[in-house]
Image: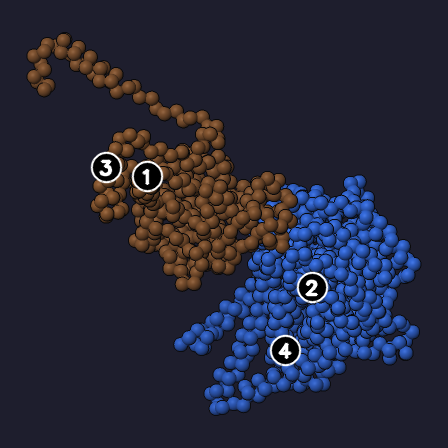
Chain colours: A brown, B blue
Amino acid sequence: MAANSFRPRVLTALAGLLALSFGSLADSRIEVCTSRFWFNYRHVANTLSVYRSVKRLGIPDSHIVLMLADDMACNARNPKPATVFSHKNMELNVYGDDVEVDYRSYEVTVENFLRVLTGRVPPGTPRSKRLLSDDRSNILIYMTGHGGNGFLKFQDSEEITNIELADAFEQMWQKRRYNELLFIIDTCQGASMYERFYSPNIMALASSQVGEDSLSHQPDPAIGVHLMDRYTFYVLEFLEEINPASQTNMNDLFQVCPKSLCVSTPGHRTDLFQRDPKNVLITDFFGSVRKVEITTETISLQPDLGIMESSNKEDQIDEERMEPLKYAEQLPVAQIIHQKPKLKDWHPPGGFILGLWALIIMVFFKTYGIKHMKFIF
Amino acid sequence: MGLLSDPVRRRALARLVLRLNAPLCVLSYVAGIAWFLALAFPPLTQRTYMSENAMGSTMVEEQFAGGDRARGFARDFAAHRRKSGALPVAWLERTMRSVGLEVYTQSFSRKLPFPDETHERYMVSGTNVYGILRAPRAASTESLVLTVPCGPDSTNSQAVGLLLALAAHFRGQIYWAKDIIFLVTEHDLLGTEAWLEAYHDVNVTGMQSSPLQGRAGAIQAAVALELSSDVVTSLDVAVEGLNGQLPNLDLLNLFQTFCQKGGLLCTLQGKLQAQDWTSIDGPLQGLQTLLLMVLQQASGRPHGPHGLFLRYRVEALTLRGINSFRQYKYDLVAVGKALEGVFRKLNHLLERLHQSFFFYLLPALSRFVSIGLYMPAAGFLLLVLGHALELWMQLHEAGVGPEEAGGASGPSPLPPQAQGIGLASLVAPLLISQAMGLALYVLPVLGQHVATQHFPVAEAEAVVLTLLAIYAAGLALPHNTHWVVSTQASDRGWMALKLVALIYLALQLACITLTNFSLGFLLAATMVPAAALTKPSGPRPLYGTLLVLTSPAATLLGSLFLWRELQEAPLSLAEGWQLFLAALAQGVLEHHTYGALLFPLLALGLYPCWLLFWNVLFWK
């Protein structure tokens, strides 16, 4: 009996778990660096720093498509082989131990990028080179390189235009390949790249406006190249403070790198996005935080009436006496990171407001007489 | 009817041209000279800038600290060299191997056409030693060269010491993407030429050299170093190469950036850089530097090993350390750091240097004049030779007249006959002038042994004196060859000859100017007015003197004086004449050993042309 009664409950509990929101499981990130040559070291460092942040916040490599157009870490000119630094004096090595580059060197082309986005890849393409997203996935796309008004240069020989990019996103929308999409671009005149988007649920950020150049941050005197671009440097600084339980929203990201620090004016576009940016958490796009809902609905799985009647009876009895199901928090962040609890807005208790209004009405009728009540009610 | 086929309009046009021609020619000549002189002034001269993206704007911290080691190597080298008298090959091999390079040697030998008196050599044989530093993580497809020429007169031991210390320092770094070749050559430029020919597997100058055992890929850039003292007060950079070729301006910009970064004093043509370009002093000094560069480029000599690298399209510079009486001195570490920085930046190159200018003039290290801005000067000068148009018109006028007169009385045999005489009388002077030019080119070297048997002179002197003798003999031509020319010498005869001579001169000068602007401009500035003015009538002695004074040899003499004057070491007449004779010998020698083109151009091209004008002058 005990076993009989136990099995359906486990099954129902399992069924409950499976019915939760499917969205966050398929979040994907695409990071593209489009520049070759040693003097474009900073573009690879940009891309790798965003990659590093995204991995740190929980996205696995299977959900990241990383495209790097040139190999800086193993370039013959690199005085520190197998490293790519983002801070001078070599404070932060963004190359690390477990970088997984999906598209490398000459495979980073406009055609391959568009195929990844739209899913039209040749049959033999391995899973790591595909974007396996569905209509519940949030996608982050980060692109960096040399660009101009309306185009981004790939590999010194071809370009992708803003119109092509907008059309690719529309194809993704029609094929239901994304739920929400965040597009970040760090190039000269980057704002021109998001001007032509027309598909819903896209939010875009760029490092500079049309007519402005995005500048690089600092040269390293030992390596001899500029290590990062300014916008991505400050975005990286911002992201280093985000942890999986952060509640920072997109409005904070829009404030990163004002003109005084960046020299160019970063821009953003939210008109195609349905939610209000201040309600969109950074971790929605950059991290992988699963929200777990516990449901107490049960689903009968066994059509055997005899067993069902007896188990139903027992369940009903048990349900009354059972405490509501509660699971430990998936990320007990407050225990790990001693965070100050966020100040919630204080509202006065409901009864107080009711009493206040009753008092006001009583005073009103006292003053002007009860006969006016019929005009109100 | 069209403008040129309508006889009435053509005559009107002809009259217009005849009237305006002389003032236009004068104006054009003056404009050309004025434009050239204005090249040193601000609108025509621009600041230099780095065009190559890969060499970027970021500087690296140099870490070279091997000054003591360099001095030690230099002393050892000097001692071994004194002991052996020639390049101490075994010691060099040992030292390069100990520093960690792959060492190879190459022997070469050459018998010069006649003994070289400035360097005191005739049968030259020597050995080059070079070490290759392989790039640790790259395929050996490209390389850079650091070379030190060692000759019997200039020991350059400090340069060798610095080369070895730099090699030791570079060997310890892992960021090289190109191989670096450290080359020590014997007998200066002869050794460099032998090495380059063997490296590129060609044989243009008849040098016998053993093939190279070790090779390192296509050479992207080369730096030649000449240092003779432990401390230097300034570094002089030489850019002009063989036949007036210049390296890509980016290489000079790179060197100048490191001069500024290290605070080194760098000079061009031995002159300090003018600081003040807003007032008149800066441009005037720039003009002096510009004239010096023009003279050096016009001579077509390789002013250092870099000049020979340029022929193979390897961008190269020569750096000379100068130790003057200035107080502030730089030691070998400072020079080494500058070289380290230059090589580190060249390491970043992905393609050959091609973004910046290949044709330019330098009024200062940080200023340049591009070809688009200096070419009009030569253009204006060559426009003067449009005087030929006037002659053409005159010839046709003279032809049209008798035709009209004879046309009334039926077909007249006069015009074709007149034209026929014109052509026949042209061929003879042309052939004879060319023959004289050929004699000038071939006879001196060929006949030197015959000359030494009959006259008490050395071979070099024999060559030079034969040159001068044949040159002067050409002056006597018109009187001797008059019998060949038809006695029916009318006005049309000399006009036709002058027309042909002007076109010939214009063609030659235009072709020379395209490749070597300085030589073309210099020759045009001197020869064009005399050529345009020459005619048999009028004050013949005056025209004769003018023509002699502007002949190629006189231009050479004059430019020698000007060159020394600009270098602030003026010559007396006797010294000047000695220098002139030495220059003639060097010119012939360099043509045979390096393939310099000044001697054949002057002997086979311009001298016959000048003889034609001399013939025109003495037509009657």
Question: Chain for mark 1?
Answer: A
Q: Position of residue B241 (x, y in %)?
A: 70, 62
Q: Which mark is residue B216?
A: 2
Closer to viewer: mark 3 or mark 1: 1
Answer yes or no: do the residues labelled 4 and 3 have beta carbons within 8 Å? no
Q: Can marks 2 and 3 be said to lie on one chain?
A: no
Is A262 on the left or on the right of A301, as rendered?
right
Mark-to-mark CA distance, 1 and 2: 84 Å
Q: Is residue B606 above or below residue B298?
A: below
Q: Confirm whether circles 3 and 1 share one chain.
A: yes
Q: Which mark is residue B109?
A: none
Q: Residue at x 23, y 47 (%)?
A: A304
- Residue ranking furthest to the front: A1
Q: Is residue A219 left or right of residue A192?
A: right
Residue at mark 2 to residue at mark 3: CA–CA distance: 90 Å
In the picture, the quarter occupied by the N terminus of chain B is bottom left
The Cα atoms of the two marked residues, 2 and 4, are separated by 56 Å
Q: Nearer the viewer, mark 1 or mark 2?
A: 1
Q: Name the residue under label 4.
A: B497
Relative to B143, B588 lies left or right: right
Q: What element carries label 3?
A: helix
Seen at 70% across and 75% down, the residue is B604
Q: Which badge, 2 or 4, is on the more N-terminal residue?
A: 2
Chain letter, disc 2 residue: B
Q: Is residue B85 above or below residue A305?
A: below
Q: Which residue type does callout 1 highlight?
A: Ala
- Nearest to the observer: residue B98 or residue B127: B98
Residue at which label 1 appears: A2
